[in-house]
Image (spheres, rainbow, N blue to C red):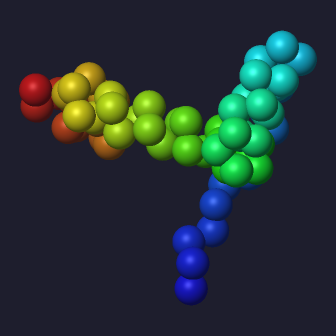
Amino acid sequence: MAERKKQIALRLSPKLYAEIAAWAEEDFRSINGQIEYLLTECVRQRKKTGRYIPDSISEKNTR
């Protein structure tokens, strides 16, 4: 069974929404899909550079 995704309410300025909508259309994605893609890429890049929030507080304290 596929993992259930969390649902969140997200407020965007009309200008940002329009920019993301245009970008999503260029990439043949839904707006939601584009936002999820962008967030996933940001998290991946942050982990790649070593600048990310650890999974637990205890992990943070061991650094």
* 59 and 49: which is toward the camera: 49
Q: Left or right: where does residue 17 sit relative to residue 59?
A: right
> What residue is drawn where x is 64% and y is 44%?
27
Quadrant holding the N terminus = bottom right
Q: Residue furthest front?
A: 26
Q: Residue 57 appears in which quarter of the rendering?
A: top left
- The residue lying at 44 percent from left, 31 percent from top is 42
Percent from the top left, x then y, of residue 14? 89, 17
In depth, the one of 51 and 21 nearer the eye is 21
Q: Quadrant of the C terminus?
A: top left
Give the answer, above or below, for where 55 lies relative to 18: below
Q: Would you place residue 30 above or below residue 11 in this image?
A: below
Furthest residue toward right:
14
Mark yes or no: residue 8 visible.
no
| Residue 55 in view, yes or no | yes
Q: Nearer the viewer, residue 46 or 61?
A: 46
- Residue nearer the viewer, 10 or 55: 10
Q: Residue furthest left?
A: 63
Q: Residue at x 22, y 26 (%)?
A: 49
Task: Where is residue 24? Give x, y as percent.
Answer: 71, 40
Horizontal relation, residue 9 to residue 24: left or right: right
Residue occupying the point 70% across, 50% down: 29
Q: Give the total number of marks visible in the rendering.
A: 0
Image quadrant where residue 2 sits: bottom right
The percent coordinates of residue 53 (x first, y second) are 33, 30
Horizontal and vertical percent for residue 38? 55, 36
